[in-house]
Image (cartoon, helix red, strand yellow):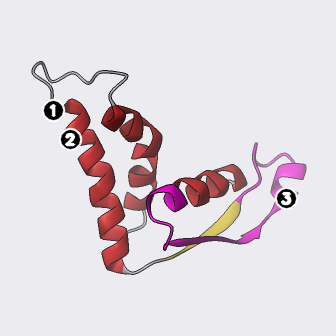
Amino acid sequence: ESKETYQYLKDYIKELMPEIEVNSLKEDINLFNLGFTSYTPCEIEIIATDDQIDELMDMIIKFEIDAYDTPNGEPKETDENYIKYQRYSWIYSLLSKYI
């Protein structure tokens, strides 16, 4: 993942579940400097129990369910749950690749 992804992941998970630790283990600036990538790749470590990861994933799914739980099935852009869904849904997608 990119260094930018790491920073967003760390910040956003901390907002939802501060007890989960997100660390950058190593990064490879040379791949960026040599033009092999358009970003600085890094290895990310998430320190959490399976239950904590499940709780985080469930929380993000609930944002989506609550956002789309409207009479016409369309979310309101100003709805708090829709805003949270927009902000955090990428975390669900990212973690789903690795669990």
Rendered position, 3 above or below 81: below
Question: Which amino acid type is shown beneath numbered disc 1?
Answer: Asp
Q: Which residue is mark 1?
A: 69
Q: Nearer the observer, disc 3 or disc 1?
A: 1
* Above or below, comparing residue 27 to residue 88 in the picture: below
Q: Position of residue 72 (x, y in %)?
A: 12, 18
Query: Does the magenta portion include 43?
Result: no
Q: Write down the region rendered in magenta.
A: 13-41
Q: How far is mark 1 from mark 2, CA to CA?
A: 6 Å
Question: Badge 2 is on which residue?
Answer: 65
Q: CA distance from mark 3 to mark 1?
A: 44 Å
Most foreground residue, 29 or 24: 24
Q: Label 2 is placed on what type of residue?
A: Ile
Numbered circles on residues, count: 3
Q: Earlier in the sequence, mark 3 or mark 1?
A: 3
| Tags 3 and 2 touching, CB below 8 Å | no
> Residue at 40% across / 44% down in the picture?
89
SS category of the residue bearing label 1: loop
As drawn, the label of residue 80 is none
Q: Is residue 26 left or right of residue 44?
A: right
Residue 98: where, in percent of width, then height? 43, 66
| Quarter that holds the C terminus | bottom left
- Marker disc for residue 29: 3
Marks 3/2: CA–CA distance = 40 Å
Q: Are marks 3 and 1 in contact (CB under 8 Å)?
A: no
71 and 46: which one is in front? 71
Q: Amino acid at mark 3?
A: Ile
Question: Do the residues bearing badges 1 and 2 touch, measured as CB atoms within 8 Å?
Answer: yes
